[in-house]
Image: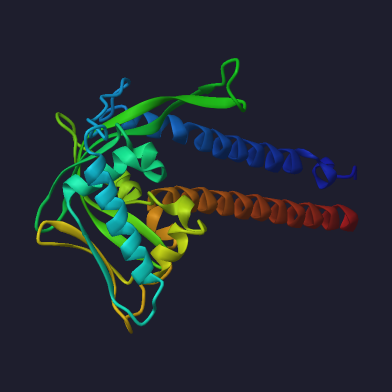
């Protein structure tokens, strides 16, 4: 009786390889497609051209700037004395003047302007730059891929959020005229780490680390250190990047499913081939 050709046929192995390759291509395609899908959603509530917000003039306001500097320096000095309470109250005018005058927040100029401070929130007009649709980098641009900017133009309502060594802005609401902002974007935009780069700054870093409170009170933003009061917990990236973490989780799950499926198919193929070999040897 002639030996069975299927006993050592490469068909099963080739089928497994083809299926695994198709799944891998699908996973890569999904990963590459996601940035374009996100860009398409972002384009629905952003603009291609900026609409810069007003910046307070420093010329003619030198006395106010000097007074603000003195108050901030006094607050920083109080923060260095662990046994002494420290407190500073900042109005909307103070914050706008700080954005206009201080280099540490120069990137907020024409992007953030405090319209008012209500009993519950900072009301801020924004022209916030985001990354747009991915494209190939042009001559003079770094890297292989780049993107044209998109601008989020609207109003946010938020509160100062303090964690150990970092002062951030907790965004409670975002209003864009004529558009609806998806919940998925709000999850990613819920906290703005405006001072993240200064955590290790020799001046601002220790000052933020020594504060124990950041709140809105009587129409002002209040920063304080209360002796004996513990600072809030360390800021975690997970709390500020929920949208990105969710995407990475989906990709990780898809990768695990792919590897599990490929391993199962390989195992079943080897098992079937051995069974067929045994049947062929028996005949």
Q: Residue at point 32% right, 29% down?
A: 151
In this view, the residue in front, 91 or 282, is 91
For residue 76, which quarter of the picture?
bottom left
Q: Position of residue 117 (x, y in %)?
A: 13, 51
Query: Is residue 54 toward the left or the right of residue 236 in the image?
Result: left
From the image, which quarter does the N terminus lie in? top right
Q: Residue furthest top?
A: 139
Query: Is residue 263 toward the left or the right of residue 36 in the image?
Result: right
Q: Position of residue 30 (x, y in %)?
A: 50, 36
For residue 130, which quarter of the picture?
top left
In the rendered image of this protein, does residue 150 appear above or below residue 198? above
Q: Residue at point 31% right, 50% down?
A: 187
Q: Residue at point 73% right, 43% down?
A: 12
Query: Is residue 193 toward the left or the right of residue 161 in the image?
Result: right
Residue 273 visible to the viewer: yes
Q: Position of residue 243 (x, y in %)?
A: 39, 49
Q: Residue furthest front?
A: 63
Query: Is residue 283 toward the left or the right of residue 209 in the image?
Result: right
In the rendered image of this protein, does residue 63 appear above or below residue 25? below
For residue 63, which quarter of the picture?
top left
Instruction: Please say which color scheme the image uses.
Output: rainbow
Residue 182 visible to the viewer: no
């Amino acid at each position: 009786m002639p030996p069975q050709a299927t006993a050592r046929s490469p068909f099963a192995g080739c089928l497994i390889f083809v299926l695994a390759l198709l799944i891998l291509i699908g996973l890569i395609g999904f990963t590459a497609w996601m940035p374009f899908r996100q860009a398409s959603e972002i384009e629905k509530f952003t603009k291609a051209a900026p609409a810069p917000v007003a910046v307070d003039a420093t010329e003619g306001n030198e006395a106010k700037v000097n007074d603000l500097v003195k108050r901030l320096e006094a607050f920083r000095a109080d923060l260095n004395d662990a046994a002494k309470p420290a407190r500073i109250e900042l109005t909307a005018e103070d914050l706008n003047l700080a954005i206009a005058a201080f280099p540490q927040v120069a990137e907020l100029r024409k992007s953030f302007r405090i319209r008012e401070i209500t009993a519950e929130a900072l009301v801020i007009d924004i022209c916030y730059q985001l990354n747009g649709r991915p494209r190939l980098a042009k001559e003079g641009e770094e890297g292989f891929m780049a993107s044209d900017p998109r601008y989020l133009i609207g109003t946010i309502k938020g509160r100062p959020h303090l964690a150990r060594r970092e002062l951030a802005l907790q965004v409670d609401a975002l209003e864009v005229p004529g558009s609806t902002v998806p919940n998925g974007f709000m999850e990613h935009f819920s906290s703005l780490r405006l001072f993240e780069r200064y955590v290790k700054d020799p001046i601002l870093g220790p000052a933020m680390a020594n504060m124990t409170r950041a709140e809105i009170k009587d129409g002002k933003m209040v920063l304080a250190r209360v002796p004996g009061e513990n600072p809030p917990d360390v800021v975690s990236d997970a709390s500020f990047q929920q949208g990105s973490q969710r995407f990475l989780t989906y990709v990780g799950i898809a990768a695990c499913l792919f590897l599990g499926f490929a391993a199962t198919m390989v195992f079943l193929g080897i098992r079937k081939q051995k069974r067929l070999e045994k049947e062929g040897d028996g005949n």
